[in-house]
Image: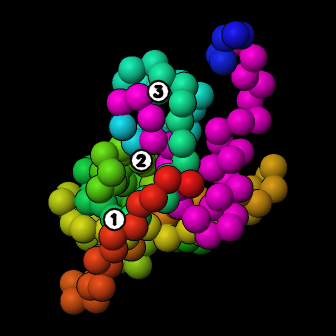
Amino acid sequence: MQSAVDTFQGDGPDREFQNYLGRGEFRLQQCQACNETIFYPRVLCPHCGGFDLQWRLVSGEGVVYSTTVVRRREEKGGPYNVAIIELAEGPRMMSRVEGIAADKVNIGSAVKARIATESQPQGERHIVLFDLAEAGSSGVANAGGGAG
Ligand SMILES: [Zn+2]
C-alpha cells in the first residue's frame, strides 16, 4: 500500500468539503479509528494518524471560543468579526459571526452554522459562517447519525 501522504495531490479533502457545502451539507471528517471529528479537512487523522476518515453531517452548533474585531474602512464594509468557533463535535474553526455588531460577539455565546458563498479571485467558494443561536427556537432535537 502506498503512503496516503505522498500520493495526495491537493484536490482531495478540501475539495470534498467544498462539494458538500455546495449541496448545503455541513460535513466534517470523523476518524473511524479514534472517533475524533476533524477540521481542517485532511487525509490523516491528527489525533491518531489513522486515514479511515468518513464525512459525517454535523449539527452546526457551537460556541464562540475567541473573537476579534478586524478594523476595516467604512467604504469597504466597516469592521468585521473574526471568531474561532468550538463546534459541538469538538473541532475549532476560524470563521465569522454575522448578524451582530462585530464588537458585540461574546466568548461563550451559542452560535449556529450557515453555509454561504463568496466570490473570490479563484471563483466561488463556499464558506461556513455563524449566527447567534436563537434562544427559544429550539427543535434541534435530532437523533440523527447513521453511517453513510
Ligand atoms: Zn483518529
Q: Of helix, strand and loop, which one carries label 3?
A: loop
Percent coordinates x, y for residue 30 in the rendering: 45, 41
Which of disc 3 and disc 2 is earlier in sequence?
A: 3
Secondary element at tag 2: strand
The residue labelled by disc 3 is: 45
From the viewer's perspective, tell me whether residue 30 is left or right of residue 126.
left
Q: Residue at x 63, y 50 (%)?
A: 17
On screen, residue 71 versus residue 26, left or right, reads left
Residue drawn at x 33%, y 74% as measured from the top left: 142
Q: Give the magenta part as a residue range.
A: 6-34
Mark 1 residue crowding within 10 angstroms, few (<14) / some (14–19) / many (20+): many
Q: Quadrant of residue 8?
A: top right
Which marked residue is nearer to the observer: mark 2 or mark 1?
1
Residue that numbered label 2 is attached to? 93
- Check residue 61 in the rendering and tell me which mark sits there, or answer none: 1
Q: In terms of sequence position, does the residue under pointer 2 or pointer 1 come before the other?
A: 1
Quadrant in which the C terminus is drawn: bottom right
Front-lying residue, 71 or 60:
60
The amino acid on which the numbered mark 3 sits, given as a three-letter code, is Cys
